[in-house]
Image (spheres, rainbow, N blue to C red):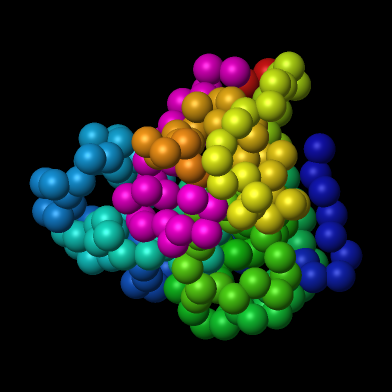
């Protein structure tokens, strides 16, 4: 069934004329900077599926921090979010959905796709800021539960030693992420919620989440 938006709208056909500019997930022919990366196989698997792209034609930049804009683009590609079920009248802009968005930036189109499909990111998010572990995990778990229609699970409290450092709004999703096996605690039993997330770490977490979603999709 088609969903019609009457305020900010545009047909899918018109959106196809949007140009795709070079961006932080640029098209690539193969990453040459993954030799010492533990998650190499997972990153390559996501790249082969067209989910993850590089920072240049042959580099993934695994140790660089992943930004909010990159995360949104990553999720849009991972969950195949588009406007196929949405009719728009008028031309939507990324800034209609995210007040800090640059409508001419590389991420503009994917921001529209994500927002139109209910991807859970604050409207005032700083798109250039790096993602820490707790926020990325929260948004990833929220996404797989939404788009994968995961069944409810019986939850027992998952212990970790730095739970007091977790933002309260994120705590439930982090509990489920540990239960799902999407994230692992370190040798000291810590989740390290405030740690900055690298592109390699984000890719590994996404790969495991998609595997879980595929195995448990309702």
Taking the image as drawn, is residue 93 in sight?
no
Taking the image as drawn, is residue 89 in sight?
yes
Q: Can you say which quadrant of the picture contains the N terminus? A: top right
Q: Position of residue 203 (x, y in %)?
A: 38, 46
Q: Work out whether residue 49 or residue 132 is closer to the camera in this orientation and state it.
A: 132
The question of residue 197 being in magenta is answered with yes
* Point 77% across, 67% down: residue: 9
Main SS of the magenta part reads: helix
Q: Can you tell which quarter of the image residue 55 is in?
A: bottom left
Q: Position of residue 71 (x, y in %)?
A: 50, 58
Q: Can you tell which quarter of the image residue 50 is in?
A: top left
The question of residue 194 being in magenta is answered with yes
Q: Determine whether, in the image, residue 191 is placed left or right of residue 34.
A: right
Q: Position of residue 6 (x, y in %)?
A: 88, 65
Q: Can you say which quadrant of the picture contains the C terminus? A: top right
Q: Is residue 159 above or below residue 218?
A: below
Total labels drawn? 0
Q: Position of residue 192 (x, y in %)?
A: 49, 50
* Point 55% across, 73% down: residue: 127
Q: Determine whether, in the image, residue 64 is placed left or right of residue 34.
A: right
Q: Is residue 168 above or below residue 104?
A: above
Q: Determine whether, in the image, residue 94 is placed left or right of residue 110.
A: right
* Point 80% across, 44% down: residue: 2
Q: Work out whether residue 112 or residue 165 is closer to the camera in this orientation and state it.
A: 165
* Point 11% across, 46% down: residue: 35
Q: Is residue 148 above or below residue 193?
A: above
Q: Can you tell which quarter of the image residue 10 is in?
A: bottom right
Q: Determine whether, in the image, residue 37 is placed left or right of residue 139.
A: left
Q: Is residue 96 above or below residue 47?
A: below
Q: Which residues are magenta?
A: 192-216
């Amino acid at each position: 069934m088609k969903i019609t938006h009457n305020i900010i709208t545009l047909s899918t056909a018109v959106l196809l004329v949007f140009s795709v500019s070079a961006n932080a997930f640029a098209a690539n022919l193969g990453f040459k900077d993954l030799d010492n990366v533990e998650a190499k196989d997972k990153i390559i698997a996501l790249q082969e599926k067209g989910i993850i792209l590089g920072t240049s034609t042959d580099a993934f930049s695994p140790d660089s921090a992943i930004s909010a804009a990159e995360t949104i683009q990553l999720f849009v590609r991972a969950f195949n979010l588009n406007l196929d079920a949405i009719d728009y009248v008028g031309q939507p802009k990324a800034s209609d959905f995210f007040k800090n968005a640059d409508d001419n930036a590389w991420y503009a189109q994917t921001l529209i796709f994500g927002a139109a499909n209910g991807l859970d990111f604050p409207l005032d998010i700083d798109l250039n800021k790096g993602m820490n572990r707790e926020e990325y995990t929260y948004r990833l778990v929220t996404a797989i539960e939404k788009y994968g229609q995961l069944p409810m699970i019986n939850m027992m409290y998952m212990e970790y030693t730095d739970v007091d450092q977790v933002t309260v709004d994120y705590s439930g999703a982090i509990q489920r992420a540990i239960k799902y096996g999407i994230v692992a605690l370190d040798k000291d039993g810590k989740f390290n919620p405030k740690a900055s997330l690298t592109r390699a770490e984000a890719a590994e977490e996404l790969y495991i989440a998609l595997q879980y979603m595929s195995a448990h999709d309702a």
